[in-house]
Image: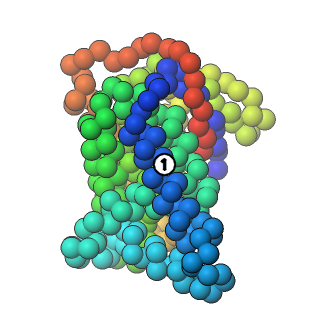
Amino acid sequence: MIRWWGAVRGAVTGPAVTYGAIAVCCAVFVISPISGLNPVYGTTDALLAAQSAYFERWGVIPAELMNSSPRALLTPLTALFVHGNWLHLLGNMLFLYVFGAMAEERMGQLQFALFSLGCGYLALLAYAAANADSEQTLVGASGAISGVLGAFLYLFPKARVTSLFPFLFFLPLRFPAWAVLIFWFVLQWLAAQGAGSGPGVAYLAHLVGFGTGFLYAWGRFRRTARVKAQAAATEGESQP
């Protein structure tokens, strides 16, 4: 898997929704049985049982969601705040930290919050519809964050991104955001071609979230000028 560190020029201070979402996701993870830090869940077999029950309660199970049970209809929202492990959490939060601030400033806090939740819900719903018989649980904010990436691509295509590629010995290279995000999208699309409905990364949710975010930004902001300015940097890593 190709990973990259990104530094986006022009980060904005005080993105309350972005920072708030990061704080909530981190807090939820730490107190959950998944982190392994909460002694209330016990150890070994008891901990594994608690983790399984936690995913089933708060995550999306496509077969149940497609049956339209009232509880299951809420899981595409609750699943956005649940992550499968530390790497999953940190990768998503870094991407949100990098790209969320500027998108939030452009949209406004309320619009950005509703936009992110909407992208995440639609992304998980689309994945469930495509895998309607699956009993595998789906969790994570990846669909919502992919929506933010899609919106960022439309709103800030010329923001500068510094990327570190392992196969180039982590040599830092600078690219416009449009090049990095389109590259990311192509990787997701290629990975989705070989992905099944079993455990793994829900690449289809990434694609749907990204497309939804881009189309929303195009529809909402196409009559206003896109931002072309470049300035200071924040950093992020990996793919959501």
Is any part of residue 192 visible from this angle? no
**Hey, which residue is sitting farthest top in the picture?**
229
Q: Is residue 54 above or below residue 206?
A: below
The residue positioned 62% from the left and 75% from the top of the image is: 39
Q: Which residue is mark 1?
A: 23
Q: Position of residue 4 (x, y in %)?
A: 63, 38
Residue 16 horizontal side relative to residue 129, left or right: right
SS at badge 1: helix
Q: Position of residue 82 (x, y in %)?
A: 46, 62
Q: Is residue 215 above or below residue 126?
A: above
Number of marks in the rendered image: 1
Q: Position of residue 131 (x, y in %)?
A: 36, 69
The residue positioned 40% from the left and 51% from the top of the image is: 143
Q: Position of residue 147 (x, y in %)?
A: 37, 42
The residue positioned 56% from the left and 18% from the top of the image is: 232
Of the residues shown, which amino acid type is indicated by label 1? Ala
Q: Is residue 73 above or below residue 123?
A: below
Q: Is residue 58 above or below residue 163?
A: below
Pick the front one: 187 or 111: 111
Pick the front one: 21 or 160: 21
Residue 102 horizontal side relative to residue 171, left or right: left
Identify the image's colour scheme: rainbow, by chain, secondary structure or one colour: rainbow
Is any part of residue 179 visible from this angle? yes
Q: Choose top left, top right, bottom left or bottom right for residue 79.
A: bottom left
The residue positioned 57% from the left and 29% from the top of the image is: 234
Q: Callout 1: few (<14), some (14-19), or many (20+) C-alpha neighbours within 10 Å? A: few
